[in-house]
Image: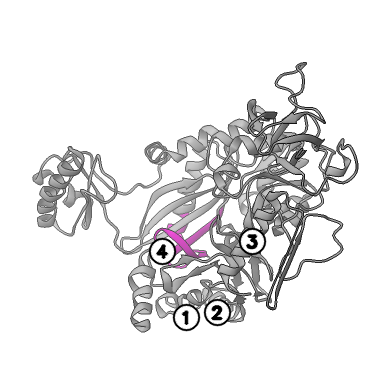
Amino acid sequence: MAIKRLFIANRGEIALRIVRAAQALNIETVLAVSDPDRDSAAAQLADRTIVIGPASATKSYLDPRLIVHAAKESGCDGLHPGYGFLSERAILPTLCHAHGIAFVGPEPEVIDALGDKLRARAMAGAAGVPLVPGSDCVASAADARREGDRIGYPVLLKASAGGGGRGMVIANNAEEAEAGFHRASAEAVAAFGDGTLFMERFVPEARHVEVQLMGDGRGNVLHFGERDCSVQRRYQKLVEEAPCAAMPDHLRKQLHESAVALAASVNYRNAGTCEFLFDVKRQEFYFIEVNARIQVEHPVSEMISGFDLVQEQIRIAGGAGLSVSQDQVKLTGHAIECRINAEDVARDFLPSPGRITRWQPPQGDGIRLDSHMTQGAMIPPFYDSMVGKLIVHGSDRADAIARLSAALDAFVVEGVPTTIDLHREIVAHPDFIENHIHTRWLEQVLLPERAKRAA
Amino acid sequence: MAEPVFSSALQTLMEEFSRSGVRELHVRSGDFELYLSSDPAASRVAVGQGGPARPKEPRPPQAVAAENPVQAPVAGNALPADAIIIRAPNLGTFYRAPKPGAANYVEIGSKISVGDEVCLIEVMKLFTAVRADGAGKVHAILAEDGAMVEAGQPLFAVVRE
């Protein structure tokens, strides 16, 4: 049954994005808002808004009972969770199903299974997806040397009982593996009372690549190509692009097939992303995890495919099959997205809420801006600091970079500090232009260079 | 005006104002002037950036809750200036009685003290009693029994005796 009235359990740019997608499908929209979000851009566009609670997210956007109660009482037959908040909490689809509301996402059992690292890894292994080479328990220094030789250096020795980096040692060769065993094991005994270790391959300069998936829940799964999200700070993505230009075509094909095989093996329904670590030196990729939601960076895949993923999500949740076949998904050109945050980069990326006094986004061919901001809009201090996503599409990576550079230069925001300047520096950096980056590049190269200049 | 601290102070002030039940606030200091009003018919516009946080006029796909206070069963037209407004602490279904068939917690004219239970708010079969945060006589009941109310929505107006 196609959804007639959609409840949107989110805020910010993604709430606006979902309202627009629903309206394009002639679906009525009811938006949940917290008290300070009453006048948000999404609230102004939605057919109806319902104030579900105060500013505190735990008493509003993070309370599944309030959300489903409001959805039910407002006569909604579908619910879109967006990303973040409750989007990957099985309780939300469980409550939706109990009240006859179609959840825009996977089944709760699938969310739970994929959310458990060990179960997800086992499912990936069973579907033939490459996993990071590693060992079982390592009991002695001799074992560590033998396993290290087999896995290939550098390796990471980790405490089985571990966490937080304690009992963790990197070994670059057999001697370091033996010495590392003694050190890591002693640390693990001291920290956890258990010296059991295991080992896995350490990739010092890895890229983060991920495949956009869409399943119908009946075993049919499409991919919309991969994204490269290697510009990160503390595991937070800042820049995402599609395709991953550093990956050769034969590997790309294997990557897509692996991701589709995993999703098909669980009859995955709706949008999801399979994340991988790409070891450029070895030309191998390994499974990280599956994100069972639409992601922040989905627009880069939309730009290269010309396909609206959020509309497809809503159609599938309403019971429709996939609206295209894999050979109808044509990926062209190159797209790059910058996440613009209201943060003070010079003060360790301090979130800086406040009022936008000037908002002058770039316009032009191949430029897309997903944002809920306008001149005079308030960024409340209670939620994340993202003010928008600037996305460009070019004929190839160099063309996309040129467009992005011009778009960033034309982007004027006043009232709060933003990361726009940092993005200008990233995009102008020779390492970025030549595509010699990895997941720790921003923290190990660009930010230290920046700090040195400022000193 | 670009100072974020100032902006967030204003935002906080507006939120506090909208919760307080105070109907008008007018501040003038040097060349700074601020006028906040909870009356939709206020003839003056707010000075400075952004008006008071007021819920937008709902365009419900279907009639659900009695949203507008003036349509609720009110004895008399306008609320007295010093009325205390008891608001919904969270979204949920508004029930005036502890259980079906039982007498309502309060009626118009009932005298209440701080801490008295005045209604229930139900979310997914979980019932929470709302307690009066002011004492006096119930002057008006501003929401419809059995309807969904939103967080912060006015439920009762109480006048001091």
| Magenta-tinted stretch | A224-253
Residue annotated with mark 4: A233
- C-alpha distance separating marks 2 and 3: 35 Å
Tell whether label 2 touches label 1 (CB within 8 Å). yes
Could you tell me which quadrant the C terminus of chain A lies in? bottom left
Query: Number of numbered discs present?
Result: 4
For residue A245, above or below residue B102: below
Tell me if label 1 and label 4 are in contact, CB under 8 Å.
Answer: no
The residue carrying pointer 2 sits among few (fewer than 14), some (14 to 19) or many (20 or more) residues within 10 Å by Cα, namely some
User: How many residues crowd mark 1 within 10 Å: few (<14), some (14–19), many (20+)?
Assistant: some
Report whether mark 1 lies on the same chain as mark 2: yes
Q: CA distance from mark 1 to mark 4?
A: 18 Å
Please, what is the three-letter code of the amino acid marked with disc 1? Ala
User: Dot 1 corresponds to which residue?
Assistant: A428
Task: Say whether residue A233 is magenta.
Answer: yes
Q: Chain of mark 3?
A: B
Mark 4 residue element: strand
Q: Position of residue A429 (x, y in %)?
A: 43, 79
Q: Earlier in the sequence, mark 1 or mark 2?
A: 2
SS category of the residue bearing label 3: helix
> Residue A301 at x, y = what percent?
58, 59
Residue A405 shows which numbered tag?
Answer: 2
| Disc 1: host chain | A
**Left or right of residue A28: residue A314:** left
* Residue that badge 3 annotates: B11
Type of residue at label 2? Ser
Circle 2 chain: A
- Residue A143 in view: yes
